[in-house]
Amino acid sequence: MIYSRPVRIILGILCFALIFWYLSRWYNNSVMSFSVGAAQVSESAEPDAAEPDAAAVPEEAETPAEPEPTPTPEPERPEVLKAAELGLPAPPEIDISQWQYVLVNGDHPLDPYDYEPAELAYLNMTGDDTEIMTGFDPNRQMVDILIAQPLIDMIQACKAAGLPVFLSSGYRSYATQQANFERVCYNNGITDGKNAEGNYITMPAGCSEHQTGLCIDITDYYHEIKNDELAQLPTVQWLAEHCADYGFVLRFPQDKRDVTHVMGESWHFRYVGEEAAKYMTENNLVLEEFVALYGVE
């Protein structure tokens, strides 16, 4: 059958449309299949984001707590142990090398022998004024300036108790002590400064506390001569009872001659500071015994 030209054109268009529809449908089905497959592969490859099973994860071992360190006790101070051996309470925690504890006697001479304090104070001998002068004055008594104020405080308190005071002897230079030693030895017919009991009545130059300027002989102005009778003076008795409150000690008690090797001197007071003075007084110690607790022999 031969169709006319218009019919053939129409049939061609229909065929072309049919072919186009068929190809479009095939293409869409192919793309959809590919997307579905890729999605399935992606889902199978993605790890499970859910929390892992707790039973499948081993529990972390607990770290045992470190025990608290046992504090190491501080070693006992040697002076405390020494005091305990002697039945004494613990001594004060001090630096025994400080100036106020220096031990000077026949076995512990000064170094150097001709030692002089760095600065001297000149005090009124009867405590009528409290001025601390630093310029030389032969009418005033000399001491190391380090003990000037506590000494003034003590003698003022003594005077306030109605008792007279007289600063008889403080600092002595090496030359002065040498002259004093020779005079006393000559007057007593001795050469070594010791009495018949073997105790010093005067110290050789370089071995006297007076050369340190840290001590003072105190009487009253009615009894300047130093002998055993001074122990009965109210002034000396008051000082012996109260001196520790001001950092002083009675340096050479009668009952300690076997330790100090010095005859009893109820008038001789030595500055050691309040802490040491109270400990020494409360426990009936002289300076030799006190410093021995700290290893000074």
Image: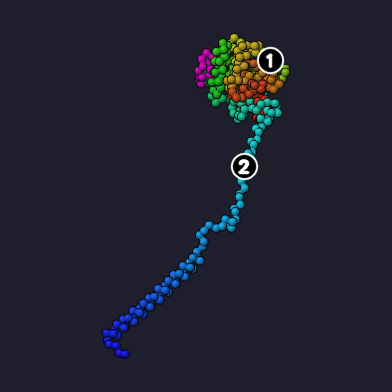
- Viewer-proximal residue among 11 and 99: 11
- Colouring scheme, one of rainbow, by chain, secondary structure, one colour: rainbow
Going from N to C along the chain, the mark reached first, 2 or 1, is: 2
Closer to us: 258 or 150: 150
Q: Give the range drawn in magenta.
A: 122-136
| Circle nearer the viewer, 2 or 1 | 2
> Residue 254, how many percent across, how many down?
68, 17
Quarter of the image for residue 33 reads: bottom left
Q: Is residue 133 rendered magenta in the image? A: yes
Mark 2–mark 1 Cα distance, whole angstroms, equals 72 Å
Q: Is residue 147 above or below residue 163?
A: below
Label 2: how many Cα within 10 Å (few below 14, some 14–19, many 20+): few
For mark 2, give the secondary structure. Answer: loop
* Magenta segment includes 155: no
Mainly helix, strand or loop, the magenta region? loop
For the point 30% across and 90% down, which residue is it? Answer: 2
Q: In the image, which disc is placed on residue 188?
A: 1
